[in-house]
Amino acid sequence: MKTKFSKRIELALADSQLRMNFRGAMDFLRNKRQLAFNDVEEWQALRKKGAAIRQDAIQRLPELLTQLEHQCQQNGIQVHWAEDGNEANKIILNIAQQHNAKQVIKGKSMATEEIELNDFLEKHEIDCIESDMGEYIVQLDNEKPSHIIMPAIHKNTAQITDLFEKKLGISTPSGDVDALIGVGRRILRERFEHADIGISGVNFAIADTGTLCLVENEGNGRLSTTAPPVHIALMGIEKVIPNIQVLPTLQRLLTRSATGQHITSYLNLISSPRKKGELDGPKEVHLVLLDNGRANISQDEKLQSTLACIRCGACMNHCPVYTRIGGHAYGSTYPGPIGQVVMPQIKGFKQEGELLDACSLNGACGEACPVEIDLPELIRTLRHRKQESSSTCWSKEVFIWFVWTKIHLHPWLYRQATLLMAVFRTLNLNYPKGWTRTRTMPKAAKMSLHRQVRERSKTKKKKENE
């Protein structure tokens, strides 16, 4: 029986336009990144430095978070702690209701996607619109982001043109990117002006100054955090860093790895609400610190490097599986290699464990990671744990490996098994179907290696006796 995941994969593979869109986009992004890191020695040195910074932050997570909370409060930022997505949604809803908010403008944030904030606010009659162009496009088409950096990368300009005409009734010349951006800008500018609350994510939070760092290219993040009277920032607890001195290293790694840029268009540093005498900025700033399983991950020595991720998307851009099926096939908030590592840890093997099967362990994601996360090893570890967690159930896979183990532990069983394989080598087996659907099942040799050696030994002795 096919799972929902396998059905989504088949649909993606059958969509030639989707595969063409992703092929072109991934090639473009990889080439830009290669040009940005054309000095191999500089790349390796920067990578090691970034990895050390992130690993240090993970090791000191409780200390840094406490420092961040204290400093933010000193600056006038209100700090809230959320154990899971449900609690984070309730905190944000409570703030919105306190201000009688009906319209929310949101900057790009994968953390809000993780907790499904848009749907939650909509159920409580609060209109939440995405201000990032890519996020706005997928929201308009009732989709989820297909990439953590470029949400609408699965669509080409012709498809976006048709979408705007269908949903907004606005026609633009086909393939005119500037015209499409102009449409989005006109609609979103009005939303910025009338929004009651602005919501954003956080790329990094500096512990010793209580500063929130937002990286962007469109300027929508800056408008989302300054135009509305209230700003709410949602941040996974792993995003904390010790001081501003380490920010340039992480910034260079993030922008070059994500889009091939040496520097991003906008770097927003938010340390407080609007102060007396200042002309702009929100009157209130709230920081919601989201755990959602991250604290447990930080305590796991084998998996804690998961939290080092800076959300650049490079692992996806270099993954041959992601390139062929796209982000929506995964059916999860975080797709690609990082999604295979994050989602089973957040939501469990029962709900997201199948994602671990969408990996050939080719190692490209690990080589591309700018902070040296060994993603293939993390995937192997999670596969092993998934297997251990289901070992009490006698599934086909568990039974096959049980028989395989017994055969290889007992020489006489092994000899009998190889003999049977040789006898029945001409049978046309179509199992396992997941393998034989795309591969030819190998046939056993007419004679096992052990038997061949014995036969040669007998022949040699016979010749010697003669």
Image: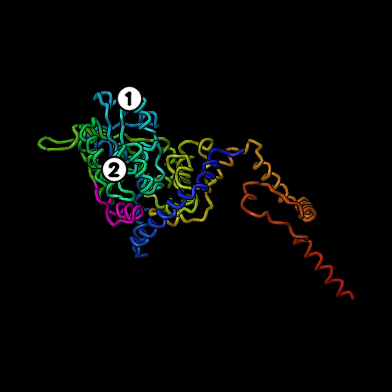
Left or right? Give the position of 14 relative to 291.
Answer: right
Magenta stretch, residue numbers: 247-267
Neighbor class of circle 1 (other Cα within 10 Å; few <14, some 14-19, many 20+) is few
The residue positioned 20% from the left and 32% from the top of the image is 229
Helix, strand, or loop for circle 2? strand
Residue 125: numbered disc: 1
Image position of 408 with respect to 225: above or below: below
Q: Does residue 411 appear anywhere in the picture?
A: no
Q: Quadrant of residue 333?
A: top left
Residue 179: x, y in percent? 27, 47
Residue 466: x, y in percent? 90, 76
Q: Quadrant of residue 372?
A: bottom left
Where does label 2 land, which residue?
A: 205
User: How far apart, in angstroms, are the residues tagged by discs 1 and 2?
Assistant: 31 Å
Looking at the picture, tell me which residue is in the foreground, 148 or 211. 148
Tell me which numbered mark, 1 or 2, is placed earlier along the sequence: 1
Left or right? Give the position of 165 relative to 440.
Answer: left
Q: Does residue 323 appear anywhere in the picture?
A: yes
- Tag 1: residue type? Glu
Looking at the picture, tell me which residue is in the foreground, 135 or 206. 135
- Tag 2: residue type? Ala
